[in-house]
Amino acid sequence: ALQNEEARAEARVLMRVQEQMLSPKMGENIIGAIQDHISGTYLLTHENPQFNETQALDLLRATRTDELPDPDGVDDDGRAFWTGRTLFSELLPDDLDLEFTSSAGDTVVIEDGQLLSGTIDEDAVGAFGGEVVDTVAKAYSKTRARILINEVAALAMRSIMHFGFSIGIDDESIPPEAQERIDEAIDNANDRVGELIAAYEAGELEPLPGRDLSETLEMRIQQQQGRVRDTAGEVAEEYLGEDNPAVVMAQSGARGSMLNLTQMAGCIGGQYVRGERIHRGYENRTLSHFEEGDLTAEAHGFVEHSYRSGLDPKEFFFHAMGGREGLVDTAVRTSKSGYLQRRLINALSELEAQYDGTVRDTTDNVVQFEFGEDGTSPVEVSSSVDESAVDVEEIADRVVDAEFDDDEEKTRFLGGERKPLNLSEHADDWWMEAAGGD
């Protein structure tokens, strides 16, 4: 057991989950919904599905809500229904007002704790900047944000079980006509690359500003490869559809991206090492499968196939070269960042923020007269460059709402119609005597 008040207070600050919710690094929440939780809230709110009473009760029974809200309407059979956004709103504070853009690209509007429009996805309840979680933690309390995350996770899991959600190999398949469009884009790009190589060898290629001919050729070829991948992505997105589970995960921010889907279903694209096409290998060629001096896309790491269709041996080898760079970067980055953190900790270990607002070391030398030069904690202020550190308008609205119960009085106070005022009713006796009154 903890032996004294100081130890108990320290444990209360360090060990409670909600105390670690906001990061001093960027002032955003680092705890939030992930993966299945985000997919669940997306399915619950994206197209605002309707639920009957039994379904609504089943969804909300996973949360602390003990009664159904008012229904949103009645269906064709005269039975009451509730929408997904209404059910999600039961988890929000009653006076929460918020507006932002979701990962799916639509505008989320919350007024008086009611989700009026938009999709709840990673940008709303996810870690590292989920707007709803971040706002609740700062405007209400970290404990309230912890409760919100727990309830969002529970409601999301009930939702995902209600709808059903799984992914298989066939979810990345596209119809033959889509594959034909991708193959046509690849053929056109190969033809264009051939023209660029011919112009380069004939000395007719116009160099880009600040680049020689070989650098210009490489950049032009990379542009063509990028266009192929973009085209493949557009085709794949068009044919996979918004209800595809893989697309749901990518659009909601739960897992992966549309680029991952493009490479699974359409075309993997060019492989690069240190930002350039692959050139190292045998003398004057990458592999013995190609002629010496071959500058084509295929000979330098372009992968035409998708993960679903499978790579040929040459493509697999080039892909492994590109993947190895990522592994090496990860290993090197880990050691470098770890050592950097160690040096920073040792250098800053003596610094303390004092009660007078200054930052001092152990010998009482002043390092900063005001913490961070502005005296604000990054945990308590907004992390967005578009927002001020303190929302003055919101604070003023809350103060006025708390002060006035009557809307007429509030309107008069804010500059509307003013009630006639008799100063004599409010004047002190001494003021009346000074003015010559009885």
Image: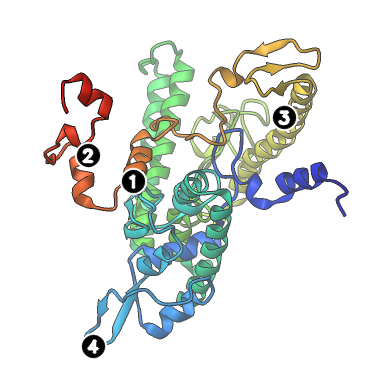
Query: In the image, what residue type sits under mark 3?
Result: Ser
Instruction: Specify few, some or many for label 1: CA neighbours under 10 Å numbering under 14, 14-19, or 20 or more.
Output: few
Residue farthest to the bottom?
A: 77
CA separation in Å, label 4 and label 2 = 46 Å
- The residue that label 1 is drawn on is 403
Q: Report the amino acid beneath label 4.
A: Gly
Label 1: element kind: helix
Q: Which mark is residue 78?
A: 4
Q: Nearer the viewer, mark 4 or mark 2?
A: 2
Q: Give the SS element for disc 2.
A: helix
Q: Can residue 267 be seen in this view?
A: no
Q: How is the image coloured?
A: rainbow
* Residue beneath the point at 88% across and 49% down: 3
* Position above or below: 181 against 24: below
Label 3 residue SS: helix
The tag earlier along the polypeptide, 1 or 4, is: 4
User: Is residue 84 or residue 178 the one in the foreground?
Assistant: 84
The residue indicated by pointer 3 is: 337
> How far from the left and from the top, in percent, is residue 229?
42, 44
The span from disc 2 to disc 3 (Cα, nearest Å) is: 56 Å
Circles 3 and 1 in contact, beta carbons < 8 Å:
no
Query: Badge 4: how crowded within 10 Å, few (<14), some, or many (20+)?
Result: few
